[in-house]
Amino acid sequence: MGSGGLELPPGDEGHEGNSADVPPGTVSLARPMATSSIGPELDWDADAWREVRTRAQRAGRAYIWLNLVEQRLRAVVAAVLRPIYEPVHGDDWVVAAAGPAGQEWVQRAVAVREVSRRKGYLLDPADDNVLSFLTLPQLRELMVQHWPCFEPYVDDRRDVELALDELEVTRNVVSRNRALSEAVLGQAERASAKLLDILGAGGDVPSARRLPVDAVEDLVGDRYADVVAVHPDRVRLLRQFPAEDIFGGARRLDAVGIGLNLLVQNFSGRRLLRLAEAGCRVRLLFLNPASSAVKRRERELGMKRGELSRSVEMNILHMRRVRSRLRDPGAFEIQVYDETPRFTAYLVDGDGSDGVAVVQSYLRRSRGMEAPVLVLRNGSRVVKSDDMDPGVDSGLFPTYREEFETSWVDSRPVS
């Protein structure tokens, strides 16, 4: 007898759900399908896994940016409004600051805080306050209501509100675990970076002027030493990090490789001349086009005899012409080496903490344009772990800088 007073048919073969001899008034129950037949229908194929991973990666990046913005805005609101309301209202200063217009949402935050207390959700005593339970729109409302108090610290209210408006779409998508497009994610990252800069929490890494610090790098930079980007080939590198962004404004440029095509072919001689005239110290180290190493490299790549040698020689001649037009040619040095080439590296401002390096290893059957590219930031790590020995230098940047200096000492100048 079922819970509703209806008789359920027996489970033997003689009483199937569609059998004609089932007593009237009974409820038919379909037999459960075999597990083996359900499995394939529930499996995610490769495309489905790729889709959900992409969704998770985008949502994760967006969450990090939103988390940083919310924490910074909460700190700014507390720093400005607490000294005004706390002396009179004590712990209820947030309730007082919200005023009649915000009573509904601030009382909701108070209730959520009490529930979190009872259920043990408050893991950090620093979060046991009403301000920690306000959402980003509510923090914004407090700021707008008390704008005269914030005006001395923030230049333009419109910039703040526009940035927060751009974040609202992302915040709603992430909070409901829906798909986030690449375009919206890019917009959110730009708006977040701008807002953090307005609120005085922009990146303090010197090289951020050339290579802006990404929120994910800022949080988990210690996992990847000083590698801040990896590109499958040089074409994709230049799409995201053009030659002007790499070399423009440099005060020191050291480069080692075979033909240094990334610099010679993507950064005009006229631009390089202006850079050197502005005081940039340049040291370029080419593979000797007459060396046996060039011939071996030609065979590796399946090139015609002398093809690579002529290409390197043309690049050297082009750099010599740039040097000849300088008032101080001594600040623009060109040398060649005869050893087996192992990598190409462009070290920009490598003598300081704001240095950036672009590095490629030479693969046996791939030209430089096709080889993977590493982008490095000087200064070891953006974030250092607390348990890490401060005397340990775990970055790759110093390794390539040392290799360059060693090769430079062993090379010969080009007249």
Image (tube, rainbow, N blue to C red):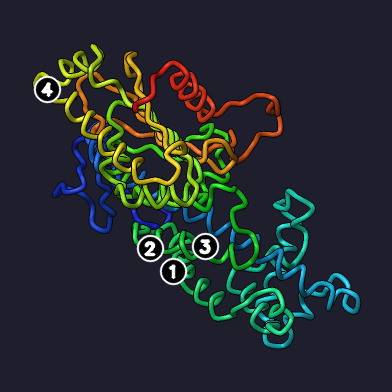
Question: Residue reaching furthest left?
Answer: 304
Residue type indicated by callout 4? Met
Label 3 packing within 10 angstroms: few (<14), some (14-19), many (20+): many
Camera-nearest label, 2 or 3: 3
Question: Disc 2 or disc 4, which is closer to the eye?
Answer: 4
Q: Which residue is mark 4?
A: 303
Quadrant in the picture for residue 384: top right
Task: Give x and y (percent) for residue 390.
Answer: 70, 29
Query: Quadrant of the image for the C terminus?
Result: top left
Question: Of residues 350 and 62, which is closer to you in this image?
Answer: 350
Q: Earlier in the sequence, mark 3 or mark 1?
A: 1
Q: Are marks 2 and 1 in contact (CB under 8 Å)?
A: yes
- Mark 4 or mark 1: name the one nearer the start of the chain: 1
Q: Is there a contact, CB below 8 Å, between mark 4 and mark 1?
A: no
Amino acid under disc 1: Val
Residue that badge 3 annotates: 192
| Residue drawn at x 49%, y 74% as measured from the top left | 165
Which is more N-terminal, label 4 or label 2?
2
Disc 2 and disc 3 in contact, CB within 8 angstroms: no
Residue depicted at 46% across the width and 62% down the height: 190
Mark closer to the observer (3, 1): 3
Element under disc 3: helix
SS for dot 1 = helix
The label on residue 184 is: 2
Q: What whole-number distance in Å separates the C-alpha atoms at marks 4 and 3?
A: 49 Å
